[in-house]
Amino acid sequence: MPDTYDAIVLGAGAAGLMCAARAGQRGRRVLVLERAEAPGKKILISGGGRCNFTNIGAGPANYLSANPHFAKSALARYTARDFLDLVESYGIAWHEKTLGQLFCDGSAKQIVAMLMEECAKGDVTVACGEEIAAVTEDGGYAVTTQTGTYRGKSLVIATGGPSIPKMGATGFAYDLARQFGMKVVEPRPALVPLTLGGDEVLFREISGVSAPIIASANKTSFAEAALFTHRGLSGPAILQVSSFWKAGDPVTINFLPGRGEGWLLARKCDTPRATLRAVLREALSARLADILADKLGIAADLGNASDKALRDAEKRLAQWDFRPNGTEGFAKAEVTVGGISTAELSSKTLESKRTPGLYAIGEAVDVTGWLGGYNFQWAWASAVAAGDAM
C-alpha cells in the first residue's frame, strides 16, 4: 500500500465503509484500516443475519443524545429512502417487518458486498487485520500499524463503541477522541437486557415466556413484546426502554394494554365465579398469568373479592414496577449510549471543531437510535455527511 492518502478511515463497519465509498467516489484517495480479519462483522450478525439495514420512519425523534437536535442535519440530507435506493440499485430484495423495519430477504452479506463494491467504485483501499499502534497529528494525520505508517490529510474515527466485545469492539474511539482533546459523554450499554434480583428473582422461573406489553422508563414508552429470561427481562420493548433506563429507576410494565379503567369490575359483574388467575390466562400465557395472580394475592372468585382489591389489581397490572439491579452489560448490548460529545463536532460535516480534518461518525458519536434499523440509518447518514465534506 502507498503511504499517503487524502483520508484515512479507522474502522470497516457500516459507517466507515459508507464514508470511504462516498469520499472515494468524489475522487479522494482513501484508506480504510480495520482491526478484524474481514470487513462488516457487526453488519453480518445484525437482524438475525438478515441486516435490519434501516427504518423507513427514521427521524431525529428516534435518537438519544445530549443534544437531541444534533442528528437533524445529517438525517435530513441522507434519508432511509436514499439508502433504500442504493440497496435496490444492487438488486437486493428486501421486506418490511413491523414498525418500518427493513431487512434483506436474503443475507446481511449482501449489504457488506454492496458497501465493498461501492468502495471499489471509488478505488478505496480496505486493509483488514491492521492493529493501530499510534495516531499522531502534524498538519495531517499519521497512523502507525504493524505493517507501516500511513498519512492522510483527514482522519475519520469510525470504530464504533464497546458493545459486543466478542466481535472485537473496544472503547478505542473514545481514547483517540480524548487524545485530541475532545470530550466524551460517559458510555453505557444500550438496547440491552435488564437483570432482576431480590423478590423479583421469582420472575426468572418463567424464563422463555413472552407477552405483548407496554414498557416505560423515564417517561418514555414502547409497545412491543417483553421476554422473561433466566437473568431478568429482555425482548424488544425492554431493549428499547433500556436505553432510557438508569440505575435505581423502575421499569414499568402494562401487562394488559388496551384495557380501560374498571375492566376487572365489569368482569366481576359478568362472570362473578371466575378467578383472577383464569381471567389473566385468557390474555397471557398460563405461567405468567399464574405468577401475576399469585403476586396480586386474590385467590377468591371475582364475586367474592372487594371492589377495592380489584381496582388495586387493575392498577398494578397496568403499572407493574420492576426494579432492575443492572443490565447484562456491553457483552449483550446492541449499541452504546454516549460517546464522543456532539458539542465537539459540526452537525453538518461531523468534523471536529477544534482539530481540522478529524471526523467522528456512527456509533462512536453520542447519537444512539432506537431498536429497529435506526442505528444503521445514523451510520449511513453521518458517514455521508463526513464523506461529502472531505
Image (cartoon, grey):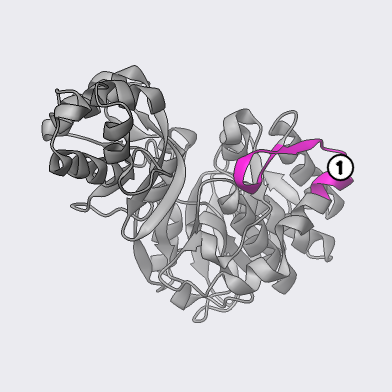
Residue at image coords 12%, 29%:
297
Residue 254, by quadrant, is top left
Residue at image coords 64%, 37%:
51
Residue 119 screen position, x and y as percent? 78, 50
Residue 5 seen in render: yes
Residue 390 screen position, x and y as percent? 71, 71
Residue 29 seen in render: no
Q: Which residue is mark 1?
A: 90
326 vs 356, left or right, is left
Residue 95 inside the magenta-drawn segment: yes
Residue 163 screen position, x and y as percent? 42, 44
**Residues rendered magenta in the picture:** 86-103
Residue at image coords 38%, 58%:
220
Q: Is residue 215 above or below residue 22?
A: above
Tag 1 secondary structure = loop
Residue 317 inside the magenta-drawn segment: no
Residue at image coords 69%, 38%:
103
Q: Which residue is nearer to you in this view: 217 or 38?
A: 217
216 vs 246, left or right, is right
Residue 313 screen position, x and y as percent? 21, 39
Q: Is residue 221 above or below residue 381?
A: above
Instruction: Give amino acid for label 1.
Output: Tyr
Q: Residue furthest front?
A: 269
Q: Is residue 76 above or below residue 274?
A: below
